[in-house]
Amino acid sequence: MDKSFFSRTAAASLLVGLAMTASAQQTRFLSGNHCIYRVDKSQKYLLLPVQEKAEMCNVKVIDGNNQVKAFNIRLASNHIDYYVPFFLDEYKESSNISFDIHVNGTYRNDGGIASFTCWKNMKYADSLDLSNREQYRPVYHHTPTYGWMNDPNGMFYKDGVWHLYFQYNPYGSQWENMTWGHSTSTDLMHWKFEGKAIEPDAWGTIFSGSAVVDHNNTAGFGKDAVVAMYTSAGESQTQSLAYSNDNGMTFTKHEGNPIITSSAPDFRDPHMFWNDDIKKWNMILAEGQHMNIYSSDDLKDWKLESQFGAEYGNHGGVWECPDLMKLRVRGTDTYKWLLMCNINPGGPFGGSATQYFVGDFDGKKFTCETAPEVTRWMDYGKDHYATVTFDNAPNGRHVAMAWMSNWQYANQVPTMQYRSGNSIPRDLDLYEYEGNTYCGVTPSPEMTAARPKKSTKTLSESCELVVTLKGTATITLFNEKGEKVVMVYDDKIRTFTVDRSKSGLKDFSDDFAAVTTAPVHGKMTQLRVFIDRCSIEAFDAEGRMAMTNLVFPTKPYNKVMVKGKAKYAVYNLK
Ligand code: FRU
């Protein structure tokens, strides 16, 4: 176990811990499926051994005689994939902490839960070593320090800091125990992991949602309070509020939760925003195969105003994670509204993707300007999902970030300490092309500002590759193992294609190998490709084509070959 989570100091104190607390004394086995584990509180962390293919254990955390928490974890039964920390300093005031553990599965003919390897391997430590041990962890994209992540949630900007919350599992690197994790950044590229922000409660786990800065204290939670609305995923899906008076570092849950209910089984992902046209709050959420649109004066009482979408766009899967915003049409004084709708499955190349609609919104009803059968995709790669924008961004910007994965294989991608990262930030606007209005997706200016003064010709594992195009071109990234990503811009039929079928590791899922193609609206003169160890995000520099794909080369691509009417430059990014 040389790749463990804990440092040498912790490992030393760990020996003392083990000597003091033999596992047999700490654990009472009550049946093949059930045991009680007495927690030793003398150190700061209990390190729990996880095996990703083991059966799920349901853990009740009991303080004296009261349950104070519950979580699910795949405690190691035969071997250990990694450890996750349980923070004992959260229970400093408690006299006695125990876990009541139930494991799923049938154990009639073997030792049952008593035979699990985890009991000999529970560790205690006073410090955590969270340094990276993943070859694929990106350099300039957000990832959780450890544990699973999916959708970005509650993103907002305040006082120079970008806040990103996310669907987080602190007890393993696969989807479970939905909690809002939190990270902060001042440049949208480098992130500080702030840990758990909103944890599951009696109303359920904490699914996706949004946050707004309540400048005028409309909710009564305080001036400039950060107010979050999320889906409580319990027996039914309902909407709940929490607020923060310390710039989003800690949240207090609202006493009147849940504040919005429905009998629809899929009812989630509320996105709130201030609508200056009507001087009210609006909120959009996904209900089954349509969106509900609400209005409110105080963020607590919401009036259902209208529904949109049952007959519009793609319905190959569940509608999730909406967003709605007013954007200027490039080069004009016209404003239109953009309604974003993430859908899974049903994406253009299978699985998850982000579709959008352009139209008008009067504070009550969204009127789509395209015909019902028209579907528009915001990004044509396979790894761009749950895309939403930051609240309160400076200078009227609308900055979007996506979860850079696909539900088809997100739980299987070849990382362990963490799973999934976010896309680079993208500024959204609208542009016209051949009589239609489309969403423009341009790498945020922070990405350009991060370029070093000098470019090179040598490809590195975290860089931006800028290709100046004068016509059709093929750009191949490759390594000495013969692994490659082939990108083709076809100037005649105006398409851009990425082939990752020989890109490296792919056998973890039948759905991974893929060729993705996007229409390009107009002549592409500059292609910007952001490479960061396991991701390739390609953009028309003018924001008229975006394509995000993961890749897992066993060695970094260190060479680039450009054929056709094109020149390239590489900017290393740190
Ligand atoms: C989208 C989604 C959301 C839900 C969350 C749960 O990826 O399914 O609809 O709130 O993930 O983690």
Image: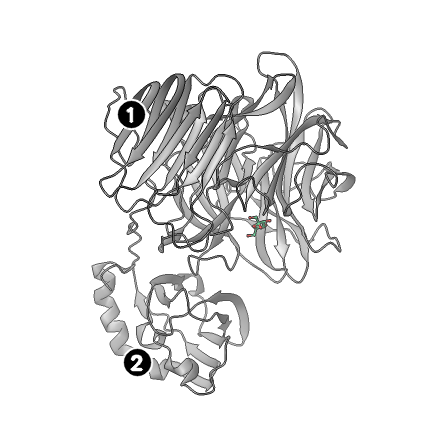
184 lies left or right of 429: left
Compare residues 405 and 42 and report the one nearer the observer.
405
> From what the image shows, is residue 558 above or below residue 416?
above
Q: Is residue 38 left or right of residue 372?
A: left
Q: Nearer the viewer, residue 103 or 5?
A: 103
Residue position marked by numbered label 2 in the rendering: 22
Identity of the residue drawn at 36% across and 56% down: 416
419 w.r.t. 102: above or below: above
Residue type indicated by callout 1: Val
The percent coordinates of residue 87 (x first, y second) are 40, 61
Q: Quadrant of residue 42?
A: bottom left
Secondary structure beneath dot 2 equals: loop
Looking at the rendered structure, the kind of residue marked 2 is Ala
Residue 164: % across, % down: 48, 41
Res 508 visible: yes
Give the class, few, some or many, for how many residues have Cα within 10 Å of label 1's Cα (few <14, many ≥20): many
Q: Badge 2: few (under 14), some or many (20 or more) residues near its Cα, within 10 Å?
A: few
Residue 317 as seen in the image, left or right of residue 501 = right
Which quadrant, please, contains the N terminus? bottom left
Vertical arrangement, residue 525 with respect to residue 148, above or below: above
Coordinates of residue 539 in the picture (x, y in percent): 45, 27
The residue labelled by disc 1 is 570
